[in-house]
Image: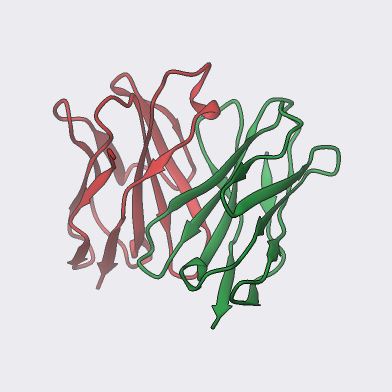
């Protein structure tokens, strides 16, 4: 069964450093998402991406964040200058893009990248 | 803005018994979708079940079923014949016209042997 994959599974970085989290969505999916989950808290939406551009982003997704689809398979989240409060689990998700709109589709999640900022 | 509320922080159930997890939501949209996701200790997010708001029939998936009450904006998950592997955090989630999932705070379910 196709699945979303994410690398690395764990990342430890120093405050102020740049990190890139990588995701490979399910191959024929067209919508991609990033979510984060701070330990003990709810999962929060960061950004959605379709047709090589951001379709929606949350207040959390400020100028320190960016997303890119550098090739036909990878989808990346970059945090330019990490802060302590960026420590969280980051989930990538994808959905097919076949229904009447992205909100009508099931999003399939990857296993997450656990980011720790020291 | 849409909100999802899970007011029970944790529940416990004996193996083989039935348990119901509660969820309420608030929205002004007429067409939307509701989900239950499971997050085991590995922290992967796994889809359990999905309900389309326009469907009156409650969704079922093997031992998992929902009680969807659209007028009351309630969406509870029933797990029958609970198994030890059902021990996890369960999140109720909503998506409407836009592309984002809005999650509740989650409930920790423990299945006792």
Above or below, B3 relative to A54? below
Q: Residue sitting at 24 percent across and 73 percent down?
A: A118
Residue found at the very far left of the displayed protein? A71
Q: Residue at x 49, y 51 (%)?
A: A44
Q: Is residue A34 visible?
A: yes
Please report the residue visible at 27 percent of the width from the left and 63 percent of the height from the top: A115
Residue at x 48%, y 25% (from the top left corner):
A102
Residue A98 point in image, percent of width and height: 43, 18
What is the total number of numbered labels drawn onto the structure image? 0
Residue B93 located left or right of residue A14: right
Quarter of image, res B26: top right
| Image quadrant in which you'd find residue B54 | top right
- Looking at the picture, does residue A111 appear above or below residue A106? below
Q: Which chain is red?
A: A
Instruction: Using the image as rendered, state which of residue B58 and residue A54 is in the foreground.
Output: B58
In the depicted structure, whether residue B89 falls above or below residue A8: below
Q: Position of residue A109 (x, y in %)?
A: 37, 46
Question: Which chain does green denote in the image?
Answer: B
Q: Position of residue B49 (x, y in %)?
A: 56, 45
In the picture, measured across the screen, residue B85 lies left or right of residue A68, that is right
Q: In the figure, is residue A36 to the left or right of B76?
A: left
């Amino acid at each position: 069964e196709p699945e979303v994959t994410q690398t690395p599974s764990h990342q430890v970085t120093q405050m102020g450093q740049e990190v890139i989290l990588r995701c490979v969505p399910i191959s024929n999916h067209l919508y991609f998402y990033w979510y984060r989950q701070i330990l003990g808290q709810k999962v929060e939406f960061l950004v959605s991406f379709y047709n090589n551009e951001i379709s929606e982003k949350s207040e959390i997704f400020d100028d320190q964040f960016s997303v890119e689809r550098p090739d036909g398979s990878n989808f990346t989240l970059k945090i330019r200058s990490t802060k302590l409060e960026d420590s969280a689990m980051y989930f990538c998700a994808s959905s097919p893009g076949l229904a009447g709109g992205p909100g009508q589709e099931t999003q399939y999640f990857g296993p997450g990248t656990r980011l720790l900022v020291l | 803005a849409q909100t999802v509320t899970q007011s029970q922080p944790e529940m416990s159930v004996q193996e083989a018994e039935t348990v119901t997890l509660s969820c309420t939501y608030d929205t002004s949209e007429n067409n939307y979708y509701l989900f239950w996701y499971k997050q085991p200790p590995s922290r992967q997010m796994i889809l359990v079940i999905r309900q389309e708001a326009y469907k009156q029939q409650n969704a079922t998936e093997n031992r998992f079923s929902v009680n969807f009450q659209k007028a009351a904006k309630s969406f509870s998950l029933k797990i029958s014949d609970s198994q030890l592997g059902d021990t996890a955090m369960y999140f109720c989630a909503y998506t409407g016209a836009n592309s984002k999932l809005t999650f509740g705070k989650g409930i920790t379910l423990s299945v006792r042997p």
